[in-house]
Amino acid sequence: MPAPGPRKLLAGLIGAGIQQSLSPALHEEEARHHGLRLHYQLIDLDRAALPPGAPPEAALPTLLSAARTMGFAGFNVTYPCKQAVIPHLDELSDEARAMGAVNTVVARGGRLVGHNTDGAGWAWGFARALPGADLSHVVLLGAGGAGAAIAHAALRLGARRLSIVDTQPGRAAQLAADVNAHHPGARAQAAGLADAMAQASGLIHATPTGMDKLPGLPLDAGLLRPAMWVSEVVYFPLDTALVRAARALGCRVADGGGMAVGQAVGAFELFTGEAPDATRMDAHFRRLVRAPRR
């Protein structure tokens, strides 16, 4: 009887405008080191056949039904679905429930379970890039799915004050209330951008602005100061307008690659049950980013 071949797994990424994602190469190469055959499929909502005027996330029910049928081991979820996916899942991990956002869904026994590896992934990249960073007053720009995960992670890392800024002030206030309910000290509050930045020791940017499809600065560069550190979540391109502006001023900077790798490390383990080599994945990610794009 022939020996069984490598274990085969199907995973993927659901999001809008994701054709440049490095996730397929990152997950598939790490799987190879573990003797697995993993195919990672991009499911781009910008290419979905939707009724005129329907938001991209309207495709979620059909996609999740298909994922069950096709035998996906799991999939990642990105903008704009990290919160919209929740009503369609069977269960949430404690982390995802606390954050109110999901970036990883695992299929087990016909059930779809939502997890969130964004917070731990951001913290992993932040600690590597900015050891000893001053956490006395952290400004978080963006209270969406990524921002929610990072807010919890920043407080776990010891942020003494967390000012949350969003274009929708009510969303910032709700996130502040949510994280204060899970962490001691009532350290988070909604804030206006200019006032918060005037006293900030560091800035975390957690909006899509700066992506290839949404270029530009998420704030007036005049609000940055050389003494601040800046943590970016956008990783394509790696040198966003914010990263370039902060470095030009002399700020310590963590680019979005750290979070991209950190969250992938957590997702890979959830999909496969194997512990990935984070250093190897980070080195591979950096090679992919530096490679010429076709």
Image: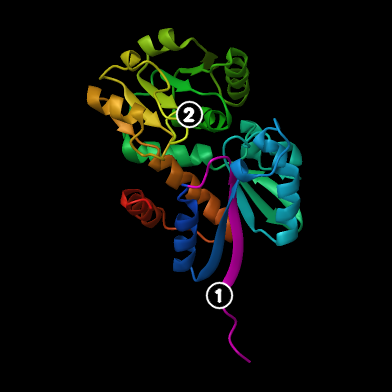
Q: In what element is the residue under mark 2?
A: loop
Asked if residue 259 lies in the magenta stretch, the reply is no
* Numbered-mark total: 2
The residue at the far front in this view is: 52
Tell me, yes or no, if residue 132 can be seen here. Answer: no
Judge the density around disc 1: few (<14), some (14-19), many (≥20) Cα neighbours within 10 Å: few
- Of label 2 and label 1, which has the lower sequence position? 1
Q: Residue at x 71, y 42 (%)?
A: 60
Q: Quadrant of residue 277?
A: bottom left
Please state which amino acid type lies under the numbered disc 2: Ala
Q: Percent from the top left, x then y, of residue 160?
A: 44, 20
Disc 2 from disc 1: Cα separation: 38 Å
Q: Residue at x 49, y 45 (%)?
A: 263
Q: Percent from the top left, x then y, of residue 45?
A: 62, 42
Q: In what element is the residue under mark 1?
A: loop
Give the position of the N terminus as an image quadrant: bottom right
Tell me, yes or no, if residue 181 can be seen here. Answer: yes
Residue numbers of the magenta segment: 1-19
Q: Is residue 99 left or right of residue 214?
A: right
* Image height of 157 relative to 120, above or below: above
Q: Which mark is residue 6?
A: 1
Q: Which residue is mark 2?
A: 206
Closer to us: 185 or 93: 93
The residue at the far bottom in this view is: 1
* Image height of 289 relative to 213, above or below: below
The residue at the far top in this view is: 195
Q: Is residue 118 left or right of residue 235?
A: right
Q: Percent from the top left, x then y, of residue 241?
A: 34, 28
Closer to us: 247 or 127: 247
Asked if residue 18 lies in the magenta stretch, the reply is yes
